[in-house]
Image (cartoon, rainbow, N blue to C red):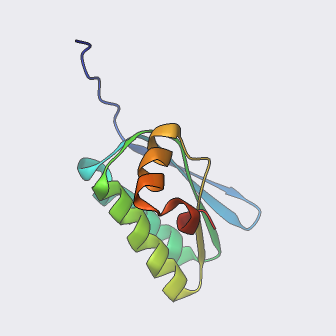
Amino acid sequence: MPEHRTEPFGVAVSEDGGSLRLRFFGEYDYAAAEQASEALARACDRGGRIEVDLAGVSFLDSSGLRTLVTARRAADRDGCSLVVVDVSERARQVLDITGTLDWLSS
């Protein structure tokens, strides 16, 4: 049986015109939820369009999903735009199964 290798979670932030892009990578799970929540909250405090790039996410669990849903609801309430873009296959499976992919990416 192959050994499970964990990939530490990280966030890279870049700005392109009026959009702020948060690139999440590694395992987006319970251990990463606080770091992700803080990055999402700082981005929403800034306002404008926020793109959450999940292309580098190798694992997504319910804790990670919860932070995305909570951040999207806060963004909608506070008048900023938060969308998920470039979703990895692993993350896409979770978002598809939970019925949140279309909502988070629109």
Q: Is residue 86 above or below residue 101?
A: above
Q: Horizontal and vertical percent for residue 32? A: 30, 50
Q: Residue furthest top?
A: 1
**Front residue of 10 and 73:** 73
Position in image of residue 106 (x %, y %): 64, 68
- Residue appearing at x 58%, y 86% in the figure: 79
Quick check: 106 left or right of 73? right
**Residue 11 visible in the displayed image:** no
User: Could you tell me which quadrant the N terminus lies in?
Assistant: top left
Residue reaching furthest to the right:
17
Residue 105 seen from this side: yes
| Left or right of 99 on screen, residue 20 | right
Which residue does the image show at 56% across and 47% down from the upper left?
87
Residue drawn at x 45%, y 45% is 93
Residue 37 percent across, percent down from the top left: 36, 64
**Residue 33 occupies quadrant:** bottom left
Image x and y of residue 20, in percent: 63, 62
Q: Is 48 on the left-hand or right-hand side of 2?
A: right
Q: How many marks?
A: 0
